[in-house]
Image (cartoon, coloured by chain):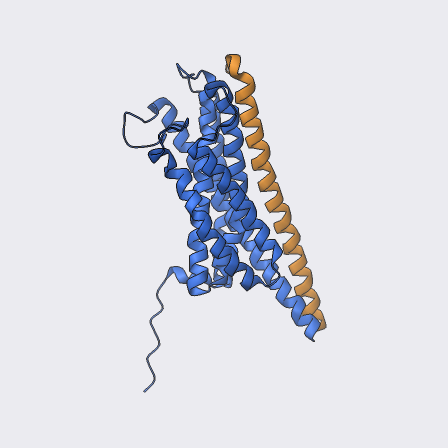
Amino acid sequence: MPNPPKPRTMSIWEYANPKKFMQTSGWLLPWVAGLSAVALVVGLVWGFFFTPDDYKQGSTVKIIYIHVPAAMMAINIWVMMLAASLIWLVRRHHVSALAAKAAAPIGVTMTLIALFTGAIWGEPMWGTWWAWDPRLTSFLILFLFYLGYVALWEAIDNPDTAADLTGVLCLVGSVFAVLSRYAVNFWNQGLHQGASLSLDKEENVADVFYFPLLVCIAGFVGLFVALLLLRTRTEIRLRRLKALEARERMA
Amino acid sequence: MMPDLGKYAAAVLSAYGVTLVLLAAIVGLSWWRAARVRRALAAQEDRMARDG
């Protein structure tokens, strides 16, 4: 007797189907893009125009509204790429591999913003643009890993091989994503201070800076999701285009 | 309207400037490439539908 058909249940794996992904992401994208634009504008305007200067740092404290969200995203995008790569390596879902590929240039941008704004902030506060501090150094290495990851995708013609090898590279680079987050906790000699958003009140930034910062973080997260959806859709279309071109040549 | 940034004006403004330029660049690039690929795929599908 044949097995009865499995009941249809909603599951996250449905989005591994490119068609389903295109449908849902097409509907979602304008909403995410709109909401993240609102959060970014509100957060940055609030932070730039309507927060006081810090008693120690003067007006440079305003750099927190771009530096902290960008640095968080630089690390978290790599973690998202790690999850997507693992799903590809284990379950062979193409959408997952393409999402990791689509995320990397956004991560490059966020890492660059974090490094640039950090240098611009470091110069007046620490008296130097750059120091071989644990957090700064692991961030620079993370940036190089991002570049290597993007380059590796471009260097390999076979998309499945490219997804395999970049997936392994992503695993290796995760060491530095984790280090840039936690190095500051166990290498005490660094210049860079600890977490800005820890729940520990002693270390945390004051509320007047904290609330606009939360809005900015929401804006950066939303911007990433919107760009990720847009870019993954492009990758899926590009893949279909390549397949159609190949079919045409065969005919 | 402009807040008084004091002696750190150059640092704060250049940090925001660099950030806005980089964000605009990634949004612009992603958008431009999305439109280009969407058009190319539509053209290919049309042609194959016509030619059978």
Q: Position of residue A175 (x, y in %)?
A: 42, 46
Image quadrant of residue A84?
bottom left
Is any atom of residue A70 visible in this view? Answer: no
The residue under the point 39% across, 38% down is A181
Chain B, which colour?
A: orange
The residue under the point 32% across, 27% down is A204
Q: Position of residue B20 (x, y in %)?
A: 56, 32
Number of numbered markers? 0
Is any atom of residue A93 visible in this view? Answer: yes
The residue under the point 46% across, 23% down is A62
Residue A105, above or below A240: above
Residue A107, above or below A198: below
Give the letter of the blue chain: A
The residue under the point 51% across, 50% down is A229
The residue lying toward the viewer, choosing from A230 and A24, is A230
Image quadrant of residue A212?
top left
Q: Position of residue A202 (x, y in %)?
A: 28, 25
Quick one: which residue is furthest to the bottom in this view? A1
Q: Position of residue A64 (x, y in %)?
A: 44, 27
A172 with respect to A211 (left or right): right
The residue lying toward the viewer, choosing from A139 and B47, is A139
Image quadrant of residue A199?
top left
A172 with respect to A235 (left or right): left
**Quadrant location of the C terminus of chain B in the rendered image:** bottom right
